[in-house]
Amino acid sequence: MPTLGRACLILALAIAAWGIAASIHGARSGRRGWVSSGRHAVYAVAAVLTIAFGVLELAFLRTDLSNVLVANHSSTTTPTFYKFSGPWSSQEGSLLLWVWLLSLWSSGALYLTRRRLRDVAPWATAVLLGFATFFVSLLVFKTTPFAITNPAPPEGAGLSPLLRHPSMMMHPPMLYSGYTLFTVPFAFAVGALIAGRLGADWIKQTRAFTLAAWACLGVGIVLGARWSYSELGWGGYWAWDPVENASLMPWLTGTAFLHSAMIQEKRGMLRTWNLGLVLASGILAVLGTFLVRSGVLESIHAFGASTLGVPFLVFIGVLVTMAVGLLVWRSRELRSENRLDSLLSRESIFLLNNLVLVGMCFVVFWGTFFPLISEALTGERAAVGPPWFDRYAAPLAIILVLLSGIGPVIAWRRATWANARRNFVVPVSAAGLCALTLVAVGGPAERPRAFAMFCAAAFVLGTVGQELFRGVRARRAMASESLPVALVSLVRRNQRRYGGYTVHVGIAVVFVGIAASTAFNSVRDVRLSPGDTARVKGYDLTYVRATSEVNSEKIAFGAVLDVRRDGDHVATLRPSQSYYPSLDGSLGALGRFFEGERTSEVGLRAGMNRDVWTAVEPNTAPLQKLIDEGDRRFAAAAGKLAPEQASALLGAAVRALAERYRRDPPPANFRLMVSPMASWIWLGVMIALAGALIAIWPRPPSARRELSGAYKARLARELSRA
Amino acid sequence: MLLAGGLVYTSFSASSEVKEPSQLAAGAAPGRTYKLTGKVVAGWHYDGKHLLFRVRDRGGPISVPVRYTGVKPDPFRTGREVIVDVHKAGDTFIGERDTLVTKCPSKFKAEKQPG
Amino acid sequence: MEIALIALVAALAVALVAWPLRPGAPVEAAEDVERAALEVAKEAKYREIRDAEMDFRTGKLSEDDYRALDRALRAEAVEVLRKLDERSG
């Protein structure tokens, strides 16, 4: 089987190389046969890589321990769910996943455009295959997923317990889908530049992919944040870590592009800017993929210094040079005929939005790479921490939310002040109402940024509500439909617009959640004995008793916490800490449990207006004497017991230890947090996703036809008159 | 443009230098915060409130002592790589709260464990 | 056994890639790229006209502004339609 896998990779490399040559030849000679062959090469690569990935998956699902990756990341006792996701918990497997996804989306994109974009598609094919060639050559020449160990070890190392969480399983595929989907518009942008087809056609054909990339990347980022919040004993969801930032940057430029693309489609303006954004998104996507595995920056996500750093850097260098070169080459043709009609127009709001988004991206970029920059400039490596990022991100985010409320209310091309004033009455009053309520409730003065964000969000809600209301009213006037029907047909006829508004609402909700949970949360680190109570922000948390649990994989020590507010029972939380044994044979039989991997199980009670979050860190020091004694005894008896006897005794010893903890627990450290409105973040994400779905959803062709039919008739009349 | 200027200025002033233990041992200005990176040396001690440990160079034996108050991150262990903001106080370095981050050694996306 | 599988996969892949190059493969009609671009421009103009109407009905444009804008957009659309007719004529 591994030979099949290896062979498929080599085959994929060969086909990709052929496809590049064929596509370029077809593009330059105009011979369609060669272009088709290039396109078929993409399909073939996808098929072959599917087989290769299948081989790897099979090895994991069958726990084929002769495969090095399986031995290092899985075991016979790993649950099937995590065996399935095992491939991408390793460097090699994740690279294979990346290039496999790339081949799938490329096939889809090229299939859908097989009859269009005749000039552009062959070049896009070559670019996409170029990406594939790079990644597959890494897998063929540098680090293979199909390495074998002989003899196969009796048991695998198992999946790191910290990764055993559904969010963590889906996080890489989502992120990679986002990254690889961004390469599609990138490739078509390059093709458009080479072919000189600088209109909006390529944007329209690849829009679905751009939206999908944006959505997948967004979901991937949020899954990581959610996992951090609910699985780690820290209680936060974002730390401005270099790798987190690396995934955020293409998302920011992607968002900017989705907006400015609309301007190009309508007015033919901003072509250079759009191309720049798309190219940047693609490059940042590859940069993100690279940062995770390079060890170049101090990050807890780092793979450690790996040998892949240099090839990636070279590849990124090539991409950047190509992008800049192409833009310069076509700079004359790219200059647009149209100018901004008026500063008070939706175009200019979009432009502002773009500037803010790109500004945010620049902030993130600067902060992330600062260690390298400072080292180059001053010789000293220096790093900036989260407070620096927050200082810039927060005001920019507030402005962004405000803009998303202003945009929909301003007309395209040119709006009049009188009109604008009239249209802003409702949203501004909504914001004002919000402001007054907050002041009345008390306390916003100390947290001006959170206050500003809440008002901005109210403003956006006011705008969108008004738009919906007026839209439905207009629809009913035009077609005399009932209210629900009008709403549905309004959205169906204007999917992009109302999908976009929904996304704006979702994002506003997310920021409200972030603002509230950051500005108003309370965290206490306390040491409690059973019976003690701690008070956090109006909640009383009582450590009722200790818990312990033993199973084949781990020992868990925890606590039962009774949460009350004003005497009313709110929740019973059971945070715990799990201890997984280390495979290191030099540690004692019992001791190795406490020297191995450790995970926290968070006790969380989420709610609409606040989350109560708890984590416990049991103190195992008092048990140390028992553990040492146990280790000594087991070591002394090592040769004298049969394996079944030994494991039975070990099991009994572990259970006795656990029981001892439960009965007589020493004081444990707790982290207790009350986080207002944290759930709004996850809620907002779902709203935004729904909006994206509305925008992507394919329109029934009948609706499209009837629309253009009506216009055709009217215009034909005018044409005949002219 | 303003943004860029502001960024550049504040980043240099708000940043803290990244140092390895050998560099800190050689000379550290008291009161200044540094980002210390290195590996945890065997023999660390946690009494439930304070974590006392030594950090050594990734590729060498020179180590410095750190005293950290706060929740001990889950993956904290001998031999693991850590990042922590410290400032010098007398003979030891005081770790600032919530800045201790332990790198997970697993080959894939490790997790942050500031505590 | 594995060798056979590999050979099979390789053969299929080569066949897939070579298929469009076989002698006697039908040559697709050259797409009129200009026409396609004009079609896209036409759709975009229709969209603009519709959006302007939406903007008017939801109160973002005054009646006078709307009428002026509508006239301008329709004139632009007529231009595009004329160019399209020229191509197919």
Image (cartoon, coloured by chain):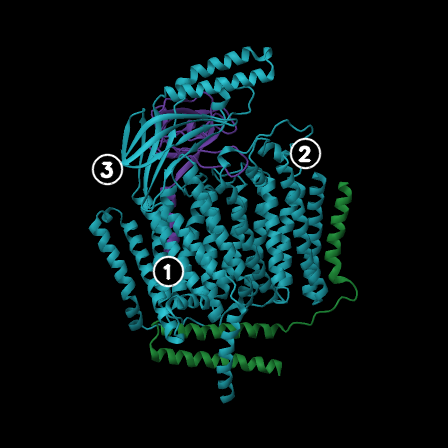
Single out the residue that lies furthest toward the front. Answer: A482
Single out the residue that lies furthest toward the bottom. Answer: A721
Q: Residue at x 36, y 54 (%)?
A: A508
Q: Are marks 2 and 1 on the same chain?
A: yes
Query: How many dots with numbers?
Result: 3
Q: Earlier in the sequence, mark 2 or mark 1?
A: 2
Question: Is A278 positioned to the left or the right of A62 in the image?
Answer: left
Q: Earlier in the sequence, mark 2 or mark 3?
A: 2
Look at the image and give the colour of chain B: purple
Q: Chain of mark 1?
A: A
Q: Position of residue C61 (x, y in %)?
A: 35, 74
Foreground of the two, A404 or A328: A404
- In the rendered image of this protein, does residue A155 appear above or below residue A497? above
- In the rendered image of this protein, does residue A180 appear above or below residue A93? below
Look at the image and give the colour of chain C: green
Q: Which residue is mark 2?
A: A148
* Chain drawn cyan in the picture: A
Res. A404 mark: 1
Label 1 Cα neighbours within 10 Å, binned few <14 / some 14-19 / many ≥20: many
Q: Chain of mark 3?
A: A
- Whole-number angstrom distance, CA of label 2 to CA of label 1: 54 Å
Q: Residue at x 42, y 36 (%)?
A: A232
Label 2 Cα neighbours within 10 Å, binned few <14 / some 14-19 / many ≥20: some
- Marks 1 and 2: in contact by CB < 8 Å? no
Question: Is A311 positioned to the left or the right of A36 in the image?
Answer: left
Residue A347 visible: no
